[in-house]
Image (cartoon, grey):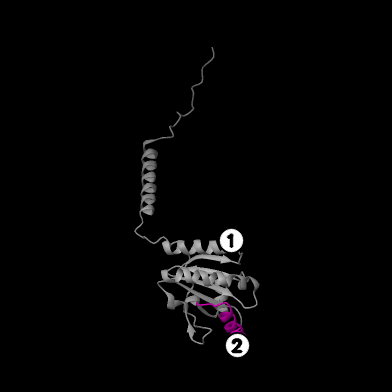
Amino acid sequence: MAVKKKDRTPPAMKFWTPLRIASTVIVLALLAAIGVSSCNSNDSSSTAHLPVVPAVVFDTEMTAANGTPIKLSNYSGKILFVNLWATWCGPCRMETPELVRLHKEFEARGVEFVGLSTEDPNTSAQKVRDFVQQYNVDYHVGWATRDVALTLMQGKTTIPQSFIITRDGRLFRKIDGFHPVRTPPELRKALEAALAG
């Protein structure tokens, strides 16, 4: 007579034990709380996620075309449009009349424009002054120091390059190069967004 072997397989365990259910509920509640707090953050600034412009850019004293010192930190609390350019740069020459128009349009709304030549101020002073006069540039013009230019450009050495900086010193937008059809509306749209932010 054959003897039946006793089944020694342990009873199957349930996956959803009371402890796992409780742990899952707690984790989901914590995730929901984090999600709600990030959506309802007390930080009302929509620019808090933007990179801060380094102090070397704001605090370096540069020379303006009229001979006075120029410091970007003097424009704190305003939207600041900074343009890196040079007198020998063809796209910069095409862009300048557009920048003059934009300056006229946005100046009354508190936007400051600063054009910083990447040329050596000792050898280009007269060329820059002539350029300012030829193109009727009515915004602040000067020379970027090497440190300021390199910090803003972040390894991209082509010009023109434009930077829109928020009232609280953050880089809102960077625009490389100039295209006569695409760039002017892109700049206008970015300035409007910076003012709204």
Q: Based on the picture, tell me whether residue 70 belongs to the magenta stretch.
A: no
Which label was assigned to residue 122?
2
The residue positioned 48% from the left and 85% from the top of the image is 69
- Residue range in magenta is 120-138
Front position in the image: 134 or 160: 134
Residue that lies at the very extreme toward the left in this rendered image: 42
Say what amino acid the circle numbered 2 marks.
Asn
Q: CA distance from mark 1 to mark 2?
A: 34 Å
Residue 133: where, in percent of width, then height? 56, 81
Report the predominant secondary structure element of the magenta stretch: helix
Q: Which residue is mark 1?
A: 182
Q: Is residue 135 left or right of residue 192?
A: right
The residue positioned 57% from the left and 74% from the top of the image is 84
Residue 75: where, in percent of width, then height? 43, 75
- Is tag 1's residue or tag 2's residue first in the polypeptide sequence? 2
Q: Is residue 107 above or below residue 39?
A: below
